[in-house]
Amino acid sequence: MQTFDITSLNVAEVRKALNYIRRAWENNDVANPLLPSNEIVPGLTISRFCFHFVLGHHTKRHNKVYKKDVTSTEPVGA
């Protein structure tokens, strides 16, 4: 199985992957189930993409909120 580095995706590719997941969810039924193990691109499963997407989004928000001021040990906005 080929591995895929999610950080190599550009914005258009991320949007395309999200759209693929949205369409798969809309078409989800007994005959055509949405499986987290389905690949969006070779080597990148839906579950792996979603995990890294959410983790990256959370990390970015966390870093923004808790950016430290140079003179203070308290997070900005605390």
Image: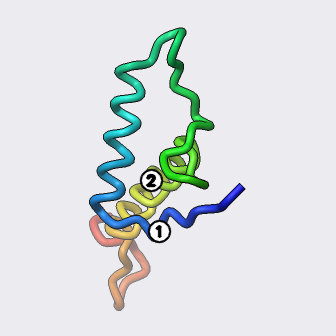
Q: Secondary structure at mark 1?
A: helix
Tell which circle, 1 or 2, labels the residue nearer the N-terminal end: 1
How far apart marks 1 and 2 lie (CA) works out to: 9 Å
Task: Judge left or right: residue 5 versus residue 18.
Answer: right
Q: Nearer the viewer, residue 58 or 13?
A: 13
Residue 7, disc? 1
Q: Which of 65/1 is in front?
A: 1
Q: Assess disc 1: are there few (<14), some (14-19) or many (≥20) residues with their C-alpha within 10 Å of its C-alpha.
A: few
Location of mark 2 (residue):
53
Total number of numbered labels?
2
Q: Are marks 1 and 2 in contact (CB under 8 Å)?
A: no
Residue 15 is marked as none
The x, y position of residue 2, in whole percent, is 67, 60
**Quarter where residue 1 is shown:** bottom right
Element carrying mark 2: helix
Crowd band around label 2 with a 10 angstrom C-alpha radius: few (<14), some (14–19), many (20+): some
Provide residue 20's location: percent of width, then percent of height: 37, 39
Q: Decide if residue 3 is on the left or right side of residue 74.
A: right
Which part of the image, by quadrant, shows the C terminus?
A: bottom left
Kind of residue indicated by mark 1: Thr
Amino acid type assigned to the residue bearing label 2 in the image = Phe
The residue lying at 45 percent from left, 60 percent from top is 56
Q: Nearer the viewer, residue 67 or 32?
A: 32
- Please name the residue shown 35% across and 90% down the image: 70
Image location (x, y in percent) of residue 48 = 57, 49
Q: Residue at x 43, y 80 (%)?
A: 73
- Residue 58 lies, with reference to residue 64, above or below; the image says above
